[in-house]
Image (cartoon, rainbow, N blue to C red):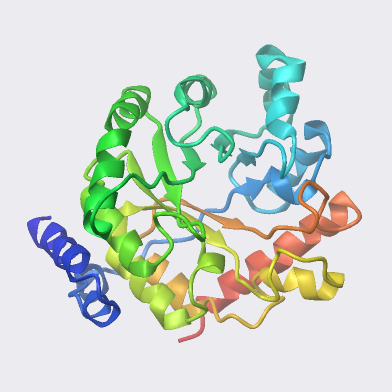
Amino acid sequence: MFEYRLSRRNACRALAGAAATAVFRPWAACADDAGWSPTFVLSSSLYGLTPLAEILPEVARTGAVGIDLWPKVHANQREQVEEMGHDAFRDLLEMHGVPLYMTTRYDLGPFNLADELQFIHDFGGKLIVTGAHTPPGENLDDRVRAFVAELQPHVDRAAELGVSLAIENHASSLLDTPEAIRCFADHAASTNLGVALAPYHLPQDPQLLAGLIDDLGPKLLHFYAWEHGQGAMTKLPKDQELQQLPGYGAFDFAPAMHALRRIKFAGAIQVFMHPVPRGVPILDTTAEISAAVNRSRESLLTSLDRA
């Protein structure tokens, strides 16, 4: 464990890309690939404003272990829960045999999650994904250190409730480069704080992504199977928009999947994309959306058989 923390500290202080990628990776050197299989979670945002009663049966159909609830503007299933009431939501989950795995709460930010932490705990969930805050500081290390310090009371509360917080590496945020992600992982000492890794927001380099996964090790709490493709900021023909999904675009996820296996990734993989405009389903029908998720999931699983 000491060796692992030391390698992270070196990566954080190096900051230069070449130095950061050269850091020793004990996970890559000694991990046993045997006995690991990926876990998938289904994002409600793929289905737009579709009622939860229609989405929940798709969890089992897409090979997922649970649901990730998204709020507006990307979806409204989190708001649906409040409209129906928690007892009714619990009944709906039980009816379909679906666990609440996590919620994504960019709308709340990292410092306003007290109620959401309690919600996740009450429903037996594991995780909340949110975004980073960028405090002042002379350099990246100072800014990351300050952010983690600001987060500490919230992480402590998450730990009390058995919930983890994962910060996504969103573009134009504190964690918008591989070096910043490594630096955050170095300072995020709590096992209840880590990274939700979104390849969409990184250079589209399969080996760089695999190396980052190796370096993060247990600090990687969530993985978005999401490539940049043609982007998600302007309206495109559907076949181009869908290139954000594994198996639809050109990105090779095999190195990343092998890296996830090397570190025995204990979190969940989420097949993901953003439609344009936000809040609409990624395809016309629920069945079509689930079929696309399954195509992507199969592509990821097949990639484990490739070198």
**Front-most of 124 and 158?**
158
**Front-most of 58 and 278?**
278
- Most extreme residue toward the right, as rendered? 284
x then y, percent, for residue 179: 31, 67
Residue at screen point 68% across, 36% down: 71
Residue at screen point 79% across, 75% down: 240
Q: Is residue 100 left or right of residue 121?
A: right
Question: Is 267 rendered above or below residue 76?
Answer: below
Q: Is residue 69 left or right of residue 262?
A: right
x then y, percent, for residue 112: 47, 27
x then y, percent, for residue 7: 15, 66
- Most extreme residue toward the left, as rendered? 2
One can see residue 95 in this view: no
Q: Which image quarter is the N terminus in?
A: bottom left
x then y, percent, for residue 290: 78, 55
One can see residue 182 in this view: yes
Q: Is residue 69 left or right of residue 76?
A: left
Number of numbered callouts drawn? 0
Residue at screen point 65% across, 48% down: 42
- Most extreme residue toward the bottom, as rendered? 307
Q: Which image quarter is the C terminus in?
A: bottom left
Question: Is 64 rendered above or below residue 76?
Answer: below
